């Protein structure tokens, strides 16, 4: 599929704006020009914030309308599934089967957020020591929300920020990753078609140093929801002061394969999830800890499964691993792997590049001081490390500045009860990989993996203010 090179416009205060400055987006597999996106300047950013703030003050988006808009958005996304999936595959490099799954997940995310819009109820507070008083709470939209989103899930991670914010009655300004902004523009078009009121949705494309920084400095914005690097997350928190933020940051997620686990199932699933979306997933499997007594057997099965993965054109339904987001990122991970090899690591499979593709790579003999283990690779590279005791494995998982999710394969029932208390992560996945996520579950980490939770029912808690009301009945 090729698309006509029509320049995409920005959504600002109910109008689609064309600008002279543009950002070029390239097909990540062919490197051909895919489209161009208008870029926002300082005046446009200010106009978007002003429009959002005015809309918030008018309070003209009641819960029943929010429900209808969000459900209609889900319906339209489903109707346009194939069109949007092909955009994701081309501008993001995601295999088409995974792109279709992302659209379906976004449909569910909007449906769940719509249901939550009907559940924003307060509480009646017992008046034990307050005779003659009636005390209750109401939930009020927090205000203007800025959603700063990454390239790796250009539809569903935007949905996880926009849908709960609108469900809570907040105007939203989206600043998507520039290299996959077409997908966000299409979602914005769908939301407008679904009836989102003027001022309640804005989409701005531009650099973090210009557009992002201006948004951080604007005191009219009440809440920031960000997915990206810990460095940027720390900068956001430092800049905004007492204003609220939900920060989904980095990870080098691990999965333990214990001696009593289903080794064959683990090898098959880990081979798939270590390289899904070319490893560019926050909870991608980066570290695999395998009990020494089963290490050789697991590694043989695992490498066989990795060798079966098809690498290539993301529009081919048979493709398992497509290109990375840019040549710069491919060069980075290539240098990390070469550095690890020079430091003593073994490349069991992969380790080569072809254009924007880095082939699925498995490393052994890796140590904790190597970047491929210590930092977030965000690439199709995984390390397999042996351990003797489960205590040793837990210590190695916890020996990280990150703490998003971890997985473990084991049949030990007592261990499955204890290990969530022992692992320093936001989510523990039993008998599956650390890369498991469904959209209704609370999702978020500890340490440098961030603050707050996503998942519509959980995200919305941060997007409303609980107001206490005391009525004097005397």
Image (spheres, rainbow, N blue to C red):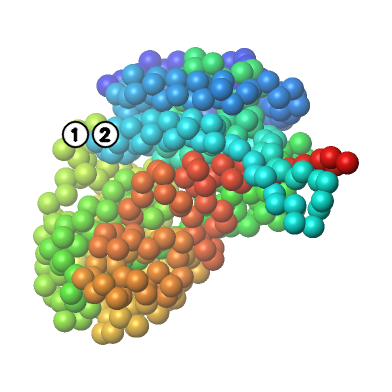
Crowding near pointer 2: few (<14 within 10 Å), some, many (20+)?
many
Q: Is residue 331 visible?
A: no
- The part of the image, by quadrant, that contains residue 101 is top left
Q: Secondary structure at mark 1?
A: loop
Task: Locate the C terminus by quadrant.
Answer: top right
Residue linked to disc 2: 96
Q: Is residue 368 above or below residue 102?
A: below
Q: In this view, which residue lies farthest toward the right?
A: 474
Provide residue 333's location: percent of width, then percent of height.
Answer: 37, 57
Mark 1, residue position: 317
Residue 365, image quadrant: bottom left
Residue 84 in the figure: left or right of residue 116:
left
Q: Position of residue 432 (x, y in %)?
A: 26, 59
Left or right, 1 with respect to 281, comes to left
Q: Position of residue 251 (x, y in %)?
A: 44, 60
Q: Are marks 1 and 2 in contact (CB under 8 Å)?
A: yes
Looking at this view, is 235 or 469 the one in front?
A: 469
If you read the primary sequence from the N terminus, does the residue marked by circle 1 or circle 2 appear first? 2
Mark 1 to mark 2: distance in Å? 6 Å
Relative to residue 2, is residue 169 drawn left or right?
A: right
Name the residue: 30% across, 80% down: 390
- Could you tell me which secondary element the residue under label 2 belongs to? helix
Say which residue appears at 46% left-offset and 61% top-offset. Answer: 426
Q: Is residue 353 left or right of residue 114?
A: left
Can residue 422 be seen by looking at this rendering?
yes
Question: Which of 326/203 is in front?
Answer: 203
Q: Quadrant of the N terminus?
A: top left
| Foreground pick, 441 / 127 | 127
Which residue is at 61% across, 46% downward?
462
The residue at the point 30 percent across, 75 percent down is 415
| Mark 1 neighbour class, 10 Å CA radius: few under 14, some 14 to 19, many 20 or more | few
Looking at the image, residue 267 lies above or below residue 87 = below
């Amino acid at each position: 599929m090729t698309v006509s090179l029509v320049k995409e416009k920005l959504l600002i205060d109910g109008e689609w704006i064309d600008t002279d400055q543009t950002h070029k987006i390239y097909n990540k597999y062919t490197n051909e020009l895919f489209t161009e996106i208008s870029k926002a300047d300082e005046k446009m950013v200010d106009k978007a914030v002003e429009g959002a703030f005015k809309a918030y003050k008018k309070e003209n988006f009641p819960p029943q309308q929010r429900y209808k808009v969000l459900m209609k958005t889900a319906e339209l996304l489903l109707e346009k599934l194939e069109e949007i999936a092909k955009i994701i595959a081309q501008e993001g490099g995601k295999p088409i089967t995974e792109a279709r799954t992302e659209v379906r997940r976004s449909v569910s995310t909007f449906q769940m957020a719509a249901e939550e819009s009907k559940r924003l109820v307060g509480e009646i507070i017992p008046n034990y020591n307050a005779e003659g008083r009636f005390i209750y709470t109401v939930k009020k939209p927090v205000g203007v929300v800025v959603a700063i989103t990454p390239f790796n899930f250009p539809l569903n991670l935007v949905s996880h920020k926009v849908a709960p914010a609108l469900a809570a009655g907040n105007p939203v300004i989206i600043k998507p990753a520039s290299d996959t902004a077409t997908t966000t523009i299409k979602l914005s078009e769908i939301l407008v078609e679904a009836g989102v009121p003027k001022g309640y949705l804005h989409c701005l494309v531009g650099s973090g140093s210009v557009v992002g920084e201006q948004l951080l400095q604007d005191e009219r914005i009440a809440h920031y929801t960000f997915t990206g690097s810990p460095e940027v997350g720390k900068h956001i928190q430092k800049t905004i002061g007492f204003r609220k933020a939900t920060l989904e940051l980095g990870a080098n997620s691990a999965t333990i394969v214990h001696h009593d686990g289903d080794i064959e199932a683990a090898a098959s699933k880990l081979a798939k999830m270590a390289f899904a979306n070319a490893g560019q997933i926050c909870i991608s499997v980066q570290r695999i800890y395998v009990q020494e007594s089963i290490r050789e057997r697991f590694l043989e099965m695992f490498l066989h499964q990795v060798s079966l993965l098809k690498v290539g054109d993301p529009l081919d339904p048979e493709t398992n691993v497509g290109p990375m987001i840019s040549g710069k990122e491919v060069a980075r991970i290539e240098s990390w792997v070469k550095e690890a090899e020079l430091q003593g690591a073994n490349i069991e499979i992969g380790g080569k590049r072809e254009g924007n593709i880095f082939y699925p790579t498995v490393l052994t003999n890796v140590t904790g001081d190597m970047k491929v283990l210590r930092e977030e690779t965000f690439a199709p590279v995984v390390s397999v490390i042996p351990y003797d005791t489960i205590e040793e494995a837990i210590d190695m998982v916890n020996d990280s500045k990150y703490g998003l999710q971890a997985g473990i394969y084991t049949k030990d029932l007592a261990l499955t009860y204890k290990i969530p208390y022992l692992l320093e992560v936001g989510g523990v996945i039993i008998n599956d990989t650390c890369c498991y996520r469904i959209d209704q579950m609370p999702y978020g980490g500890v340490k440098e993996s961030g603050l707050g939770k996503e998942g519509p029912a959980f995200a919305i808690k941060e997007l409303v203010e609980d107001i206490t009301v005391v009525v004097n009945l005397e």
